[in-house]
Amino acid sequence: MSEPDHLAGDTNLAAVGALLSEPARAKVLLALTDGRSLAASVLASEAGVAPSTASHHLARLVDAGLISATTRGRHRYFALAGPQVAELIEAVARVAPPQP
């Protein structure tokens, strides 16, 4: 049985793992799993980091295609890039150990 194209050996699973391994980015992604779009300031608070730090993490997640950004007035709102990202986060959460 052959693998689907998206599961072939050229998939960079480690890149996604590296993004998820940073606790602040993981908290941002978890905060977005309920389908809401949240402002950067809210996500900074959820992640427990300064707004400037959150901005860096949000940019990395946008660049990786895991979240999308929409500008409304003076604020940028972020959401998961699609249902497949929500499925990924939920699958990882099922196998992740509980936080200490």
Image (cartoon, helix red, strand yellow):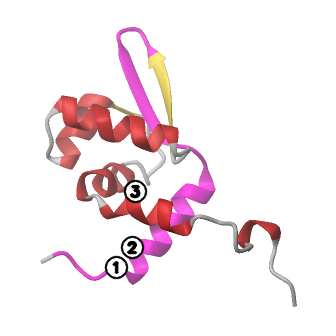
In the rendered view, does 38 fall on the left or right side of 24?
A: right
Frontmost of labels 1 and 3 is 3
Residue marked by disc 1: 96
- Mark 1 / mark 3, whichever is N-terminal: 3
- Mark 2 / mark 3, whichever is N-terminal: 3
In magenta, the rendered stretch is 72-99
| Label 1: which secondary element | loop
Tell me which amino acid carries mark 2.
Answer: Ala
Q: Quote the CA–CA distance across marks 1 and 3.
A: 15 Å
Is residue 85 rendered magenta in the image? yes
CB atoms at circles 1 and 3 under 8 Å apart?
Answer: no
Tell me which amino acid carries mark 3.
Answer: Leu
Q: Quote the CA–CA distance across marks 2 and 3.
A: 14 Å
The quarter of the image holding the N terminus is: bottom right
Residue at image coords 30%, 30%: 40
Tell me where residue 17 appears, x and y as whole percent.
43, 66
Residue marked by disc 3: 19
Tell me which amino acid carries mark 1.
Answer: Ala
CB atoms at circles 1 and 2 under 8 Å apart?
Answer: yes
In the rendered view, does 79 fall on the left or right side of 40?
A: right
Residue at image coords 48%, 38%: 62
Q: Identify which residue, 34 or 58, lies in the foreground.
A: 58
Tell me where residue 39 appears, x and y as whole percent.
33, 29
Q: Which mark is residue 93?
A: 2
Is residue 79 rendered magenta in the image? yes
